Image (tube, helix red, strand yellow):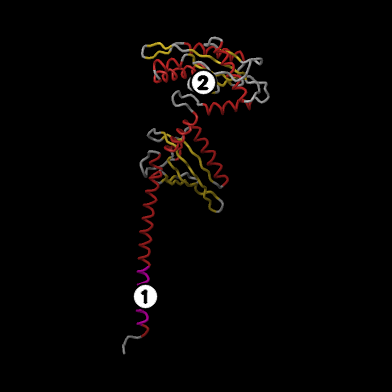
């Protein structure tokens, strides 16, 4: 039999067991630490790829803390000292005011907010960010505000481009027919009482088909661009100037335009579009017929039909002129226009 007392054996066994348990726990902690480090690396990589950074601002001393991506978004050296007063200067004035308003309200309400904002970085780069914020409280007192900032510049550019393609004519830069129809509907609704002025003008180029047939479509396209520039110049106070067909343009005048002002503008349009277009030293002669329908409470389709009838009358009168629809004009469906 062993001479070692049983109590000593028991203590030795306990030490071995506890040592083994401690080793197992240390091993588990190392594994968890490694897993946490790996997760942090994945988060950091995902954060960089998505251009999303985390920020925190302590209250009330306004001390800022940023992750690396936020530094990158603002073009600041990573880890540099942050001064919130200077950071706010990266936001345009109106945006900074809106940010202050939302931030103040969130702190007062112990809530949060989100907004898309434009910034001008310390290097002068223009970027768009999506900012989220949440207020954290301790015993009902706001102690910090934190959230994320994401660079959405590419998304903003793509969205603006998509919207532009949906609303504008690529060749001339004028509004397209879709945007024109929407604006026409809006102005007709605003004139529901029928007591306001304003007008719809349809402009059709005279002689444009001959340009395409004799000089080619490339020259015709250049002519359209020049015509569009002249219309934008003459119709600066119009609600919208649009290209609504191949060589047809639509102009909407606001309800503040009187019939006399409308007629004067139509005269200016005819004069401006009758000037020759210079192309490679060659003078290309075009003209314009203009049909006008005064906004008088009629429906959108009826207003367009009246302007179209007046346009046909202008062409029948010899072209290079304008006509205003009169109530006793024939408004039946007309035949095809000559170019």
- Position of 166 compared to 298: left or right? left
Q: Is residue 94 magenta?
A: no
Q: Residues within 10 Å of mark 2 (few under 14, many from 20)?
A: many
Q: Position of residue 33 (x, y in %)?
A: 37, 59
112 and 42: which one is in front? 42
* Front: mark 2 or 1: 2
297 and 115: which one is in front? 297
Q: Position of residue 195 (x, y in %)?
A: 67, 21
Of helix, strand and loop, which mostly describes the magenta segment? Answer: helix
The residue labelled by disc 2 is 249
Give the Cα distance between marks 2 and 1: 91 Å
Q: Position of residue 58 (x, y in %)?
A: 47, 47
Q: Residue furthest toward the left? A: 2
215 and 35: which one is in front? 215
Q: Is residue 20 magenta?
A: yes
Question: Does 113 appear above or below 28?
Answer: above
- Position of 311 compared to 224: left or right? right
Q: Residue furthest toward the top? A: 318
Number of numbered labels in the structure image: 2
Quadrant the N terminus occupies:
bottom left
Q: Position of residue 189 (x, y in %)?
A: 63, 27
Q: Quadrant of residue 279?
A: top left
Question: Does 120 appear above or below 231?
Answer: below
Write the residue at 46% across / 24% down. 173
Please tell me the numbered disc located at residue 132: none
The residue labelled by disc 1 is 17
Question: Does 271 appear above or below 3?
Answer: above
Element class at badge 2: strand
Q: Which stretch is magenta?
A: 8-24
Write the residue at 51% across / 14% down. 288
Q: Residues within 10 Å of mark 1 (few under 14, many from 20)?
A: few
Element class at badge 1: helix
């Amino acid at each position: 039999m062993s001479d070692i007392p049983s109590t000593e054996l028991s203590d030795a066994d306990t030490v071995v067991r506890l040592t083994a348990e401690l080793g197992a726990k240390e091993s588990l902690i190392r594994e968890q630490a490694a897993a946490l480090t790996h997760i942090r690396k994945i988060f950091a990589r995902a954060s960089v790829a998505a251009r999303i950074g985390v920020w925190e601002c302590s209250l009330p001393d306004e001390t800022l803390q940023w992750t690396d991506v936020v530094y990158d978004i603002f073009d600041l050296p990573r880890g540099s000292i942050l001064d919130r007063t200077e950071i706010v200067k990266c936001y345009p004035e109106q945006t900074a005011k809106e940010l202050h308003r939302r931030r103040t309200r969130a702190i007062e309400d112990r809530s949060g907010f989100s907004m898309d904002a434009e910034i001008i970085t310390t290097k002068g780069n223009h970027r768009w960010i999506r900012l989220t914020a949440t207020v954290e409280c301790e015993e009902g007192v706001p102690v910090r505000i934190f959230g994320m900032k994401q660079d959405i510049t590419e998304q903003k550019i793509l969205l603006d481009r998509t919207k532009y393609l949906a609303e504008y004519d690529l060749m001339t830069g004028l509004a397209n027919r879709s945007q024109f129809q929407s604006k026409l509907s809006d102005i007709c609704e605003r004139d529901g009482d029928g007591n306001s002025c304003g007008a719809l003008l349809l402009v059709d180029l005279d002689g444009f088909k001959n340009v395409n047939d004799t000089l080619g479509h490339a020259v015709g396209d250049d002519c359209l661009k020049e015509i569009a520039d002249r219309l934008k110049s003459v119709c600066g106070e119009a609600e919208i100037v649009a290209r609504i067909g191949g060589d047809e343009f639509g102009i909407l005048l606001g309800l503040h335009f009187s019939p006399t002002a409308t007629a004067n503008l139509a005269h200016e349009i005819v004069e401006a579009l009758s000037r020759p277009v210079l192309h490679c030293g060659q003078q290309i002669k075009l003209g314009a017929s203009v049909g006008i329908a005064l906004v008088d409470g009629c429906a959108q389709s009826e207003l367009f039909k009246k302007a179209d009838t007046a346009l046909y009358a202008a062409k029948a009168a010899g072209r290079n002129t304008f006509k205003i629809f009169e109530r006793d004009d024939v408004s039946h469906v007309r035949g095809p226009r000559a170019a």
